[in-house]
Image (cartoon, coloured by chain):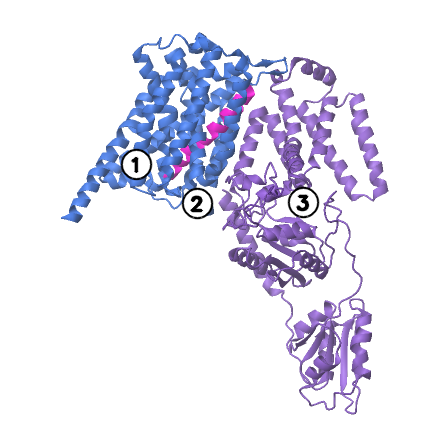
Chain colours: A blue, B purple
Amino acid sequence: MKTEKYKISNSQMMFMSISFIQGAHLTIGFMSDITGRDIWAAVIAAFLVSLIFISIYIKLAQKFSGKSLIQINDILYPGVIAKFISLVYILFFFMIGVENLVFTGRFILSYVLPETPLWVVVTMVNFVCGWAVLRGIEVIARCCFLFSLISASAVLVVTLLVAKDMDFSNLQPFFETSLKRFIQGAHVIATIPFCEILVFLMLAPNIGDIKGMKKSILLGVSLSFIQLLVIAIRDVAVLGPLISIIVSPSFETTRVINIYQIITRLDILIAIVLIISMFVKISIFYYAVTKGLAELFKLNSYTYVIVPVGIVMINLSIMTFGSSAQSDYAAAHIWPSFALLFEFIIPPVSLIIAQIKGMNKKREEVG
Amino acid sequence: MFRYILRKVAFLSTCGKNSNEKYKYKEVEENRLCTDIDQNLEALKNILGSSNDIITREFVFAGEGRVKGLLVFIEDLVDNKIINESIIKPLISGTPLIYKKENADNVNVVKSEMLSVGDVKQENSMDEIVYSCLSGDTVLLIDGSAEALIIASQGGENRGVEESKTESVVRGPRESFSEDLRTNTSLLRRKIKNPDLTLEKMKIGRRTGTMVCISYIKNLAAPELIEEVRRRLKAIDTDAILESGYIEQFIEDAPFSIFPTVSHSEKPDVIAAKILEGRAAIMIDRTPFALTVPMLFIEDFQSPEDYYSRPYFSSFIRIIRFLSFLISILAPATYVALTTFHQELIPTNLLLTMAAAREGTPFPSVLEAGIMVITFEILKEAGIRLPRPVGQAISIVGALVVGESAVSAGLIGAPMVIVVAITAVSSFVVPFQSDTGSILRIILLGLAGFMGAVGIMMGLLVLIVHLASLRSFGAPYFSPLAPHNASGMKDTAIRAPIWLMDTRPSSIDRDKRRRQAAHSKPEPPKKQ
């Protein structure tokens, strides 16, 4: 493919990680019923935990510079086990893609187009993502600057407009949730928006400067963390105790805006941000799945599997959940424990194996 | 699927090539001159045919040898003054210098001692002779020598250098290119008095033999770019090149995209500015438009006047232009999305007013918008093509009948007319993108009618991804927005002061060399 010649630069990487995590603007909704008003603290805790794991992923990428996750597995694990782990990872990425697709589709259905059938929305979103995947990951990376700018300015606008409705005493009392629930909430935030950045390991062959990537990814993650924190504090300050019963706090916060009866109901702005950031997120997972399949089955090009993967994604997203309540419950209570294995256990183990193997090799060279 | 279609297209185009091979020019068998002037004349007449504008003037050189000579030219293409004063006069009545027919040096003697014309070439290939004759040069054959002299004598009628019609400016040079290639290159030379300005000529088009000229600045344009331009131009194998658009469609990177990836202009100052940034310009004979490559999307939003007036106003106008482009593609779609899907976003009072105005209109707003947008395109097209007096009638009919009576008859809601009017006016702000705008507007309108704001968003996402994936001669088309670069931002939504734009656009000039001294900021003299 011609588009694959051009590598992703460091600043593109930064904006890509910002856009990628911006997809969590609204997903923050489904953990708000776990942590309630302490969600901002959970965001901070989750960020700190995630930093450790993100550093592990980066370390892994740098150790095998220019190799994707599938190739890394092939090196670290023996034969069939490597293939099995790779396959499970692809399935994991696939499920995240489907979950995001369901979330987007259900969101659009419930807030923007209530009478449209789900499959129309999902097909349309997936078509756009598939088309972007066909153009190549570099193209998606290039667009991320614009996308993250649009999302960030939407957050800024909403925050400024809602300023007069904010009441910071709503943040009190601090830490009213039990420690167990707090940890659960932080875990959800760590696994869903932050540590999903693991998927960038699949893009490693397309990154221009693996060594300089660490700074740009960490900067991107931190910037989007600040954005997420602003959103969390804003939503709590505006909504107060209501936050734990509302399905989508950001959306409700935006609905509060009312300036001279003219600037009202800006919720469409949030929908736009959601569509943009979800587009980036789904496309990246979609790309990871197709690329992973191509590498696993040694295909010439990943473009062959775009259409079949897309069809399965659409079907699965229609069938998996009966309602958005179900999908939210799954995301908040089931998925994080599932993701634990892929995000928090396998990568450190891989890194340790890599270190041991590396040491052995060195010893052999010396001896 | 796309690949399948592309393969089919590629197959079809190779088919075309094969059949083209058969109908190549019938090669002239004897395509070199011989020493006998009568045979040469016979051969020339054979090729040129019996058209009555071809003049073959036989004469005898002054002097005792009475050597025969022959001038061949086309009556209306040559400058008669040159023929009479500078060619025929010295040959017939000048100092006798030609003595013998067998003297091989005759051609040189004539060239260096008799003709008083600047550009004279020796040539013995029949094809070349015929081509120069057809392009307005005079051919001189001398009995006994197998070489002819091609004497530059192009003349005839040409439109002079006039004021630009398509890109008018308030401040800045008025002149624009005309149809004549030489006039155009001279306009460029006068702007850039630098030996590095290179003009490479090339002949394209089997039947039209159009002169095409690649112009660039030797040390600024990347050698790979020039090589690529040459390669693509050489690959053109066609009958006719009648306008720059022919060349554009043969060399563009994305022939299936609705966005142009080759830029064009008819103003010498614009072309000069572009080649000074490291681009290559392609000038085509008989066309007042020159092409430049590589092209960036934002070029269409840059007017030469932005650089001539001061930065604040230029930046303001830039932003207005971006806004107008967005309005021109999005306004009808947004109106339809708002009235059909998201009424809650409209402030209540406005909603009531709009509902009152739309009350009783028979069509849904998508259809209404579709009708109005198409009507606008029809009126626009009619206004452009018709002779001017009739064109005015069209605009009156359009304004009164469509605007006024459609509303008062209750067929179309008044807000719709306002929206379409704004769209129409905005679409003229960025003239180069107005054709893409028309297509995008209708596509987005359809998407808005289908899925409201979500549909519009989907359309825009596809649009942005498409723009980001385009390349024009190696340069990323949507740069400096995607991929972003900070130095390019100085000339995007804002136009930074000239003294701040010290490097050339990095997507075109990869080396990022400076174009002016680093500290060019004007400052008052320091007090002692």
* Chain letter belonging to callout 1: A
Q: CA distance from mark 3 to mark 1?
A: 50 Å
Residue B238 in which image quadrant: bottom right
Q: Which residue is mark 3?
A: B304
The spot of residue B224 in percent (x, y) is 51, 56
Seen in the picture, residue B376 relative to B176 is either above or below; the reply is above
Q: Which residues are magenta?
A: A267-291
Q: Amino acid at mark 1?
A: Lys
In the image, is residue A287 part of the stretch drawn in magenta?
yes
In the image, is residue B127 part of the stretch drawn in magenta?
no
B103 and B267: which one is in front?
Answer: B267
- Evaluate if marks 3 and 1 touch, with contact meaning CB atoms under 8 Å apart: no
Q: Amino acid at mark 3?
A: Pro
Mark 3 Cα shell of 10 Å, populated few (<14), some (14-19), many (≥20): some
B191 and B368: which one is in front?
Answer: B191
Residue A112 in which image quadrant: top right
Q: Which residue is mark 2?
A: A4
Residue A56 in which image quadrant: top left
